[in-house]
Image: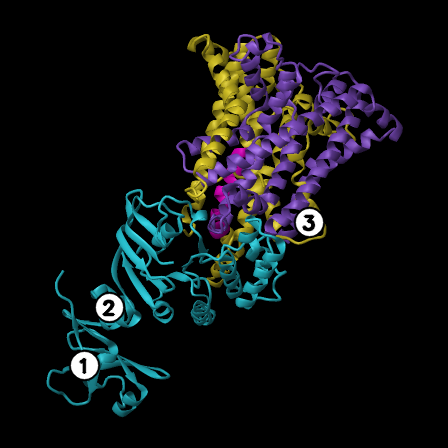
Chain colours: A cyan, B yellow, C purple
Amino acid sequence: MGIAAVDVTKRFGSYTALDNVSVTIPEGSLTALLGPSGSGKSTLLRVIAGLEQPESGRVLIGDEDVTNRPARTRGVGMVFQHYAAFKHMTVWDNVAFGLTIRKRPKADVADRVHELLELVQLEGLAKRYPSQLSGGQRQRMALARALAVEPSVLLLDEPFGALDARVRKELRAWLRRLHDEVHVTTIIVTHDQEEAMEVAGQIVVLNGGRVEQVGSPRELYDEPANEFVMSFVGPVNRVGDTFVRPHDVEVRLEPEDGSTEAMVERVVHLGFEVRVELVRDNGQHLLVQLTQEEAEQLELERGQIVYVRPRHETVFSAG
Amino acid sequence: MASNAAVLERPTGAVSGRAGGALARGVAAGYLTIVVLLPLAALIWSSRADGADAFWHQATRPEAVSALKLSLGVSAVCALINAVAGTAIAWVLVRDRFAGKSAVDAVIDLPFALPTIVAGLTLLALYGPGSPFGVDVAFTRVGLLLALLFVTLPFVVRAVQPVLLELDTEMEEAAASLGAGSLAIFRRIVFPNLLPAILSGVALAFARAVGEFGAVVLISGNIPFKTEVSSVYIFGQLQSGNGSGAAAVSVVLLAISLGVLLLIGAFRRWRTKHDYA
Amino acid sequence: MPKYLLRFGALGYLSLLLLVPVGFVFYRAFEHGLGPAWDAVSSQQAVHALELTLLMAAIAVPANTIFGVILALALVRSRFPGRGLVNAIVDLPLALSPVVVGLALFLLYGRGGWLGGLADHGIKILFAVPGMVLATMFVSLPFVVREVVPVLREIGTEQEQAAETLGASPFQTFWRITLPAIRWAVAYGVVLTTARAIGEFGAVSVVSGKIQGRTETLPLYVQAQFEQFDIQGAYAASVILALIAVATVVGLRVIHPREEES
């Protein structure tokens, strides 16, 4: 089922977390709510879940207006950043929880739990307690638990935030594959643009309680709506009113038409790519991204003078 | 353990604050009212019944004043001794290692668990007439102090222990790497962090000591103007039918208890002032 | 060297103040053998005192446990005006003299008090069991609340929210998620409450009238026997109370490590 938030406003005391936000989530999609802390992304997720009540606006799941319904009747599955594992229950009991309280027959529950544990690759750990699992395993358990009651919508609140970098990367790919298999409408909240770009088909960029832009990862990167989106979604050089991506900066050893002089401050080799930090004579710093080949050809060194020119610039109209 | 008053910060979770929550709150409020508030309200009301002058007259009678001075004085000395002894005991329990430490740790709770009258009796047996040590402090202020030290023993220990346990030894290690000696480390790093906890424990011990009845009633002899504390005075007034006298002094003790609780709250806010969010 | 000084100083203080006196009571009680000690506590008066004491606890402890958990939930999970005040009221029994507690009850339910009329309708509060139960409930109120509040605060609401999104009703959430998470804190609080309820002396002293065989609890019995120069009886009853206290301390020890585990 698709989800829609229509003109949602949420305040905490005098602080406005969401300001007339409207978002449409297509059925079966994997959408990311992306933004810095305080942007309102988690709040929006919780309003959709029913854990927070908006001051105004509506939430629709499928075609139904669920705004006034409590969380437990909305059919949402939720996964939290710190797992929210039921610490006193085994993995099995955790996953079975939603079914147990609905008084499903034991045999059915057993079948479903087995199915899910296999899906999330935790078979064999059924009798363990959450404290005996790694962070990544706990989060997979949390996902299985949320999926057990066949929710129409899956909501993930910074699910990989508490895990270390390698596990995070693994789980991102794993989530993508899971979604391909299960096809539940999924919303993931994250502040990590790389994560959003990697995992989601559609990204909603939020800032200060407002939607900045909605689009596919490609659209956001190539056609950002404003400065905020552009700089949030990837590194960017700002020269006056123009914005240039590091990989759109041409570096030459000889001056050319339209190029500017700059000195190499630092060359960082990151394996496949080379990052060059330059400084202009007016003190401005520039970041350039080159392929290893390009860098080798230029034989760049600290202190060297080069000439830079943008291959592609972006200017945003005022307002 | 029962060392710090319940911590109050911003509530966590609006989820349960709906219908079920309101019912629960109502029920709890009703219980609290019937069991605690109503009797205390009746006490305060009763003390005002004859007017402010009568109240003042009863509260300032020589015997009452003497009892109050004694209660406050002995409790203060008791609290001070506890500050030192309690901290030392907490230190030994946390930082030292010896056989039977776990048992010693458990024993600290004994004054919490033992009826006060039994505490008084045991001290009287050992340090009163017929003492095998040949010591007799019955009917003296020393005996009084002894009884109070017994019942207030756990307060400072249990207040300091968790703070000491939690104390990031990294701070002490950093100080050592910067050249500080043990005494300096204690004075400048450990002690300032322990102080709020010590003061909380001391305040609670003081409040407990001021109101203590069962432990002192046997050993002190309750001699007016010598070893009679306020709680015993109140009891005596009640028995001889002077209800207003009893009520007046009781209200004074109530005010002292409330004041101490407010102080402890302030200490806690002080303690968490420097904590990370 | 200061380490040993500190250690022996601390242990010495504890011994002289705590261990030796308590051990001495056991000695004195059984000084003349088990027989006389047993006789002393099996008198009808003593047995009744013990029964009455246990009755006090049997009523006060469950009441303070149930309401204690509800109070703790209200204090931690709800927003309402006067939380600070409620918090102070809950802590008051810890800082207030038991005699003041007894007097307050006396003034409320006695002749001329706001609820003094109850006696006229045949409901005797003072000089009877109900008054003693109320006194016991008052003084043993804080313990479960204070043990549960920090644990509730620490576990946060995420588990409860997760349960809600999984379809659990508020009751199901409380029963299956919240309660198991706080069970050790509740157990610890119950042990403390029980010890306090059994050992209460001052407040019960005031409201009971100390009527032998009717409103005399075991602690009151100890005092009565001492004043009547039945030292043997006083010590013997003290031993029973001391044994309960030791059991309490052992119980606390057993529960506490578990508390840290979870």
Mark 2 or mark 1, which is nearer the start of the sequence? 2
Q: In this figure, which residue is indicated by the disc labeled 2?
A: A230
Q: Main secondary structure of the magenta part?
A: helix
What residue range appears in magenta?
B187-204
Let me know if residue C95 is in the magenta part: no
- Are the numbered discs 3 and 2 placed on the same chain, yes or no? no
Numbered badge on residue B101: 3
- How far across and down, in percent of the image, does residue A299 sit? 27, 90
In the picture, measured across the screen, residue C20 lies left or right of residue A29, that is right
Secondary structure at badge 3 equals: helix
* Camera-side mark, 1 or 3: 1
Secondary structure at badge 2 equals: helix
In the picture, measured across the screen, residue C136 lies left or right of residue C42, that is left
Q: Residue at x 49, y 19 (%)?
A: B251
Secondary structure at badge 1 equals: loop
* Camera-side mark, 3 or 2: 2
Q: CA gap, disc 1 to disc 2?
A: 17 Å
Q: CA gap, disc 1 to disc 3?
A: 74 Å
- How far across and down, in percent of the image, does residue C113 sit? 53, 11
What is the three-letter code of the residue carrying label 3? Lys
Q: In this figure, which residue is indicated by the disc labeled 1?
A: A311
- How far across and down, in percent of the image, does residue C24 sit? 77, 33
Q: Relative to B106, say whether C62 is above or below.
A: above
What is the three-letter code of the residue carrying label 2? Met
Q: Relative to A22, say whether B236 is above or below.
A: above
On-image quarter of the N terminus of chain A: bottom left
